[in-house]
Amino acid sequence: MNVAWCVTGAGHLLKESVETFKRLKEQGVRITTFVSRAAEEVLRMYGLFPQLEKISSGGYLEEVFLESEQGASFPKAGRFLLKKYSAVVVSPATANTVAKIASGIADSLVTNAVSLAMKGDIPVFVVPTDFVFDSDDGTGVLRSKMPYTIDREVCRTHECKRCPPAEVCPKNAISGQIDLLRCDGCALCVPACPYGAIRGGESVEIRVRKVDARNVLTLIEMGIHVLREPGDILEALATLRSRR
């Protein structure tokens, strides 16, 4: 079974998505990973980018395609019209990506992949980040984990002659704050701070907007399979495989 995995720039459900596709890889599924520009940054922030090489090891239909390297026409998306894949999975799918798909816009690597997959009659599965499944209209409050940050109320920069976390950071990402565009989530800085000022994985509340919830409902109307969480991908693909 060949599956196209599309990753967008959300931290919410990202780690769970990576773990799910690692399990699919172990089951013998060949996975091509399509990474949006925002996802390139977020995967590094959370220290998950190296995992992609284990999931998509580089052989044919097991490549990692970065949007930043694909050009404006996204030629690799043409594979969907050639029916090279049994399914396309977008996980996690940001509200921005969902809105574009719902509006018929295909101006990025991921939205192009979804558009051509639908034109090629390939099943599309989406795990949205902004939708509450247990509410009547999809709105409500979600909880999401944040990348590494410095708690300014705990940090004692004014007392430190040198900053141990900054000294051990291999990406030079710490200078009074953490530059998340440089940070690769290695976490070497966390134990280096004598005051415990560097935090990661803390949970925050996110309120789902009505417009985002409506866009998810539009995907369902379009015939796209919307899944509650990344773990549901395993059952969905197993069901798809049994029908073929």
Image (spheres, helix red, strand yellow):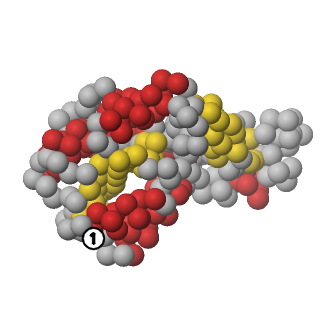
Q: Is residue 156 left or right of residue 4?
A: right
Residue at the extreme front: 136
User: Among all residues in the image, which is located at the extreme left?
Assistant: 82
Note whether residue 66 is visible.
no
Residue 191, compared with residue 135, is above or below; it is below
| The one of 3 and 158 positioned closer to us in this rendering | 3
Residue 140 to residue 197: above or below: above
Count of all numbered marks drawn on residues in the image: 1
Horizontal and vertical percent for residue 55? 38, 66
Residue under the point 80% across and 46% down: 197
Q: Residue furthest right?
A: 159
Question: Which one is in front, 94 or 221?
Answer: 221
Left or right position of 194 against 102: right
Where does the image place residue 36, in percent across and percent down from the top left? Answer: 36, 42
- In this image, 21 relative to 14: left or right? left
At x 20%, y 46%, the residue is 117
Q: Split into 4 quadrants, where in the image is the C terminus?
A: bottom left
Can you say which quadrant of the picture contains the N terminus? Answer: bottom left
Task: Estimate the x, y position of residue 129 in percent, counting from the top left.
Answer: 51, 41
| Quarter assignment of residue 102 | top left
State the residue in front, 119 or 38: 119
Image position of 20 (left or right of 207): left
Residue at 71% over, 47% down: 202
Q: Is residue 150 visible?
A: yes
> What residue is disc 1 on?
242
Looking at the image, which residue sits at the far bottom?
A: 27
Specify few, some or many for label 1: CA neighbours under 10 Å numbering under 14, 14-19, or 20 or more: few
Identified by mark 1, the residue type is Ser
Q: Residue at x 22, y 38 (%)?
A: 115
* Residue 43, horizontal then vertical, whole percent: 48, 49
